[in-house]
């Protein structure tokens, strides 16, 4: 089932690239404050992009048969990702809901781990939303999946339009949620609950 890439992060190459960027912007990478910056950035990138080397489907190899066929929602899952267009962070909260079918459920932490793994790649918010929903739909075969993600993008805050605090909201609806507005509204009301 695992479709992981066998490559790992090339720390040396990242260090060289960061040093070149520092030089390209007119900095001296050999000054005291920047001496270890290439190494720190390489270590950070290996952590921030660890999702490239993981398959979120692996989290659903173990499921439970509990006879529960009503909504399961894990909300306010914090995540951090890197915009693939500018390589600056975006961060926010994910809300993941599904309706089990035939009582098949996953451990609740698996929903949060799926969000985290998918987010830890050079990414687009829309792709995170769709990938999380599609993964759960494929692996649990539920009656429906509904994922809502809200995030602030540093590429809109720090540069370009410079609008701090602006939130982007994306959603993905699968199964019963695709055409049932009552079911979607139920999830949205749950998400808004304190």
Image (spheres, rainbow, N blue to C red):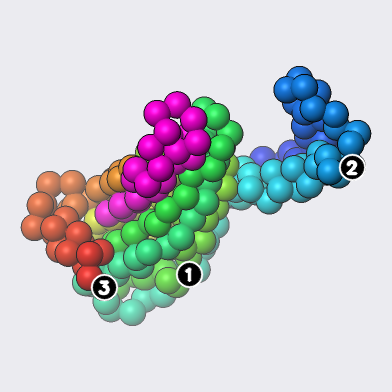
Give whichever of discs 2 and 3 has the lower sequence position: 2
* Earlier-in-chain disc, 2 versus 1: 2
77 vs 158, nearest the viewer: 158
Residue 52 falls within the magenta-colored stretch: no
Q: How many numbered dots are placed on residues in this image?
A: 3
The single residue placed furthest to the bottom in the displayed view is 66
Which range is magenta? 146-167
Tell me which label, 3 or 1, sits earlier in the chain: 1
Labels 3 and 1 touching (C-beta < 8 A): no
Using the image, determine if residue 135 lies above or below residue 95.
Answer: above
| Nearest the eye: 191 or 7 | 191
> Seen in the image, is 136 located left or right of residue 169?
right
Q: Which residue is mark 3?
A: 194
| Disc number for residue 109 | 1
State which quarter of the image contains the C terminus: bottom left
Residue 38 spot, x, y in % from top left: 81, 39
Could you tell me how far apart the alpha carbons at marks 2 and 3 are, in whole angstroms? 48 Å
Q: Which residue is mark 2?
A: 32
Q: Is residue 156 magenta?
A: yes
> For the point 75% across and 43% down, which residue is it?
41
The answer to whether residue 102 is above or below residue 162 is below
Q: CA distance from mark 2 to mark 1?
A: 42 Å
Placement of 92 over or under 158, stated as above or below: below
The residue depicted at 22 percent of the width and 64 percent of the height is 192
Q: Find residue 169 and report its image quarter.
A: top left
Name the secondary structure under disc 2. Answer: helix
């Amino acid at each position: 089932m695992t479709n992981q890439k066998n490559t790992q992060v090339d720390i040396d190459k990242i260090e060289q690239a960061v040093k070149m960027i520092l030089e390209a912007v007119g900095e001296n990478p050999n000054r005291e404050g920047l001496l270890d910056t290439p190494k720190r950035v390489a270590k950070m990138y290996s952590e921030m992009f660890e999702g490239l080397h993981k398959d979120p489907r692996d989290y659903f190899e173990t499921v439970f048969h509990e006879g529960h066929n009503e909504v399961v929602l894990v909300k306010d899952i914090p995540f951090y990702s890197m915009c693939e267009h500018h390589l600056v962070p975006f961060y926010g909260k994910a809300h993941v809901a599904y309706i089990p079918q035939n009582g098949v459920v996953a451990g609740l932490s698996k929903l949060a781990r799926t969000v985290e793994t998918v987010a830890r790649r050079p990414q687009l918010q829309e792709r995170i939303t769709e990938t999380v929903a599609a993964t759960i739909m494929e692996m649990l075969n539920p009656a429906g999946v509904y994922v809502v993600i809200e995030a602030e993008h540093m590429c809109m805050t720090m540069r370009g339009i410079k609008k701090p605090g602006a939130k982007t909201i994306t959603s993905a609806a699968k199964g019963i949620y695709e055409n049932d507005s009552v079911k979607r509204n139920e999830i949205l009301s749950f998400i808004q609950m304190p």
